[in-house]
Image (spheres, grey):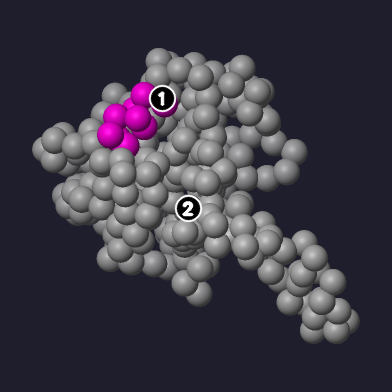
Amino acid sequence: MSVSISEKRAKFRQLHQSGCFVIPNPWDVGSARALQHLGYKALASTSAGYAWSTGRSDNKVTCDDVIDHLTLLCSAVDLPVNADFEGGFADAPEGVAANVTRAIATGVAGLSIEDSTGDKAKPLYDRSLAVERIAASRAAIDASGADVMLVGRCESFFVGQPDLGLVLDRIVAYADAGADCLYAPGIRTKEQVAAVVKAVHPKPVNLLIGWAGGLNVAEAAELGVRRISVGGSLARCAWGAFMDSARDILETGSFETFARGYPGAELNKMMS
């Protein structure tokens, strides 16, 4: 690795100062190196993509698993990496802070903390606790002395509560508690995006675009979005091609889908 951790972190913060950039989500070292090869400026891990690559469903990996995964990603590329750190792998603010400290040591340039509980009966943490969890994450980063960006995520739309008023209230509170960047996955319309951007201005907003037919980069930039991530969508595309080919072989005996495969020689060049 030719770029130091501090240089990656400085570059990452600089990317958030102006313009709009796409921060794609690799799920392993190979996909991370491929995205670096293509010319992206930063990467973000994906909890779902990583879980699928290990034969598990999303949110079924441990903190230890993710720490090991982040360590590998950060050491494999010269780009800054933002960690999808789920809910911090703890309920109490103290536990979240301890795990954030562990994540910082992997070399990440940023990390996100969600307010979802994983409990269908009560899918979001109470507002006060959710804010305390962000504040504890901020304190852990400050205590480390590392220039790691904290992303505050409101999961309301993702857990079946598409209440824009709730989202705006929470992301403003997360910004006040020390989040450097705000994120409300699941918002889709221009009106929703514009409202989120306005609510936390001048702090940057991350927009998730993980479906066909969403906003394009130019449209998101015009609304004031600073960065765009794609979640597990690149991993789903890879799995889609894999499943189509494997199913075609089984059902028709044909190997014609192999014609769409990426050249092995080019893959070897990327990974060398």
In the depicted structure, whether residue 14 falls above or below residue 158: above
**Front-most of residues 185 and 266:** 266
Residue under pointer 1:
16
Q: Judge whether residue 23 is colored magenta.
A: no
Q: Which residues are magenta?
A: 7-15
Secondary structure beneath dot 2 equals helix
- The answer for how far apart the CA atoms under marks 1 and 2 are is 21 Å
Between disc 1 and disc 2, whose residue precedes?
1
Secondary structure beneath dot 1 equals loop
Q: Which mark is residue 236?
A: none
**Front-most of residues 257 and 37:** 37
| Residue 252 point in image, percent of width and height | 88, 81
- Taking the spot 47% from the left edge, 65% from the top edge, the residue there is 51
- Taking the spot 82% from the left edge, 76% from the top edge, the residue there is 255
Residue under pointer 2:
32
- Taking the spot 73% from the left edge, 43% from the top edge, the residue there is 212
Q: Residue furthest left?
A: 143
Q: Is residue 242 left or right of residue 119?
A: right
Q: Amino acid at mark 2?
A: Ala
Residue 130 in view: no
Q: Judge whether residue 14 is colored magenta.
A: yes
| Residue 44 point in image, percent of width and height | 44, 45
Task: Using the rendered view, name the quadrant where residue 59 is placed.
Answer: bottom left
- Taking the spot 52% from the left edge, 46% from the top edge, the residue there is 37
**Front-most of residues 78 and 193:** 78
Residue 197 in view: yes
Q: Amino acid at mark 1?
A: His
Q: Is residue 207 left or right of residue 95?
A: right
Callout 2 crowding tier (Cα within 10 Å): few <14, some 14–19, many ≥20:
many
In the depicted structure, whether residue 199 falls above or below residue 32: above
**Front-most of residues 144 and 207:** 144
Callout 1 crowding tier (Cα within 10 Å): few <14, some 14–19, many ≥20:
many
